Amino acid sequence: MNGPVINPDQPDDPPEGNALFNRPFCVLELRTAVEAGIPIQPVVSMSDKPIQALRKKKDSSMAQAIELLRDGEADAVVSCGNTGALMAGGTLRMRPLDGVDRPALGIIVPSKKKPFVLIDVGANPESSSLNLMHNAVLGSNYARAALGIENPRVSLLTIGTEEGKGNSLINASGIYLQAIDKKVINYVGPIEGFQIFDGDVDVIVCDGFVGNVVLKSSEAVFGFVGNTMKEELVRNPKRIIGAALSKSAFRDMKVRLSPDQHAGAPLLGLKGNVLKSHGSSNYIAIANALRIARQIVRHDMIDSISSDINQANDLI
Amino acid sequence: MNGPVINPDQPDDPPEGNALFNRPFCVLELRTAVEAGIPIQPVVSMSDKPIQALRKKKDSSMAQAIELLRDGEADAVVSCGNTGALMAGGTLRMRPLDGVDRPALGIIVPSKKKPFVLIDVGANPESSSLNLMHNAVLGSNYARAALGIENPRVSLLTIGTEEGKGNSLINASGIYLQAIDKKVINYVGPIEGFQIFDGDVDVIVCDGFVGNVVLKSSEAVFGFVGNTMKEELVRNPKRIIGAALSKSAFRDMKVRLSPDQHAGAPLLGLKGNVLKSHGSSNYIAIANALRIARQIVRHDMIDSISSDINQANDLI
């Protein structure tokens, strides 16, 4: 046993902050265990090749955590380790749900209004239109469980009508989404890149390549803007004084936009709850990832996904 | 005649700001002409379907500007009109260069260090690996002509090794780029979304769907960050005073990051210079678009692209 064991009888109110570390809730993957002072060998490192890593390192905390999930001893696994290994291990051991070809990584992203789900952010960089339809079903269920939105507005990421209206993948996916609209999901139509952060939709569907690039380039823009702002704010004494007075505003902004607020991206479409938190997760990120794990366990999200996927597959 | 006519004998130093409006340089497309007080009918509107628009509206300034280019009366066309119509019209009338399957829109983007070229940002949302190789050649020549970089560092946008190393399009394109490396372009390898704004490369190659989403979502992040910052800066009097003192820093940052600084995206790979400036272009944007038009005309960019494309096609 590499970490604290699941106790499915949870208190009603989610504990906040790193208090979660002391609660028997999720099986934590190695890196977290190490951070909590429980070093275990062998480690699945960030540079290990995904499938080899899990085959060769069966005693690693990641492999063991997934085993506990498969044996029903854990309800969820939260890992900050090698994403590829976690996805490969999760998929091989837990298997995709019947009717799901490829699992997808869903992530909660802040917006001008409420946070939304972006799916897929990297699990399947070579999607078919059927995969994107499944992403819509997965994302919709995830938004319901994690964000508490009863009837999430689902949209499809595309490019402007100006430039020639998306591509064949997106056009075919749009037809599928219309076919399951009102019956399985609440499809509100396509969305363009410039609308992503408006907060007018609850789920944005895309393939794993596009989603990963959007997610990472958006984080890069935050960094770039922050960098430029710092340069400008120290250019003369007046600006430096101004920046000192409004320092707390920048701090609060950073907290609001931090990925830690919505850490814990589940690999959706599997028979078990496998969540990835980023490698540099702090206690806030881990606490939030555990909170999300609890939400999706409590909402029986997997059962609900399974039923919706069957319904969607029947409709097309 | 709908706008000022080309005079290929240019002064040596590029004129700055809206002084360009008074110079006989480029044929301006309608919307610009209207802004300059020369309303002409019929208009190709933003909602017109691209190909129909140009077939039915042969007297439109956009159609006429492209005709002037084809007839050799203009060296470049700069338009702020309907992108799809401009791309369709430009491609149909000017034709792609021999050896180029699909033209690509290249745009100059600011970064933490120097600006770089992102190509394609929407002309070809369904690219093959050969298209991406051509984008690399086009982008490299554009960086040389517009940014004055002798040996531009070309990279290929992909997603992390963690998530399974790109997709088949990117992998195949990478092989092509390696094949023409050192001979036609200076290929420095793949780049991830989080590295886009680091400024360590001069050209980032991607397909039109991904490039358009990245460009527009990045602009959306700027808006989102600005929005959040404004909300935080007015939360209490101390912050308001601080913001007032550092106001000029925000103004300067906005100028540095404004798309107007690098307006004018050429549709590369055609036999003529067709440039798109955004629909809401102000005089700074137009001036910069005209400056870029002049740069690429002066550098005989089309001849240089033609030669590089032939060389690249011979190598693979």
Image: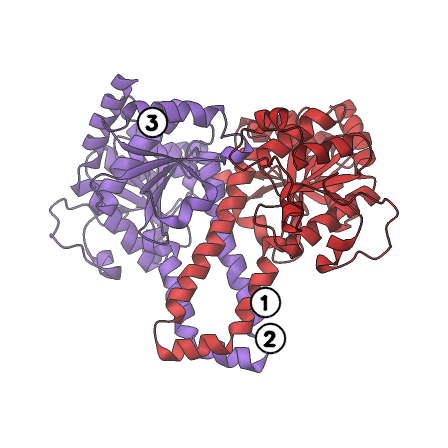
Chain colours: A red, B purple
Label 3 crowding class (10 Å Cα cut-off): few <14, some 14-19, many 20+? many
Image location of residue A196, percent across then percent down = 57, 48
**Disc 2 versus disc 3: distance between alpha carbons?**
51 Å
Query: Is the residue under label 2 in contact with that under label 1 (CB below 8 Å)?
Result: yes
Alpha-carbon span between mark 3 and mark 1: 44 Å
Q: Any mark on residue B235, and which?
A: 2
> Of the residues shown, which amino acid type is indicated by label 1?
Asp
Kind of residue at disc 2: Arg
Circle 2: element type:
loop
Q: Nearer the viewer, residue A89 or B154?
A: A89
Q: Do tags 1 and 2 sit on the same chain?
A: no
Q: Quadrant of the C terminus of chain B?
A: top left
Query: Residue B314 bears which disc, if any?
Result: none
- For disc 1, the marked residue is A252
B4 vs A64, nearest the viewer: A64
Q: Which amino acid does the dot numbered 3 rest on? A: Leu
Whole-percent x, y for residue A144 in the image: 77, 45
Mark 1, secondary structure of its residue = helix
Q: Is residue B39 at least partly visible in the picture? A: no
Check the residue under mark 1 and report the chain it is in.
Answer: A
For the residues labelled 3 and 1, say whether their Cβ atoms are less than 8 Å apart: no
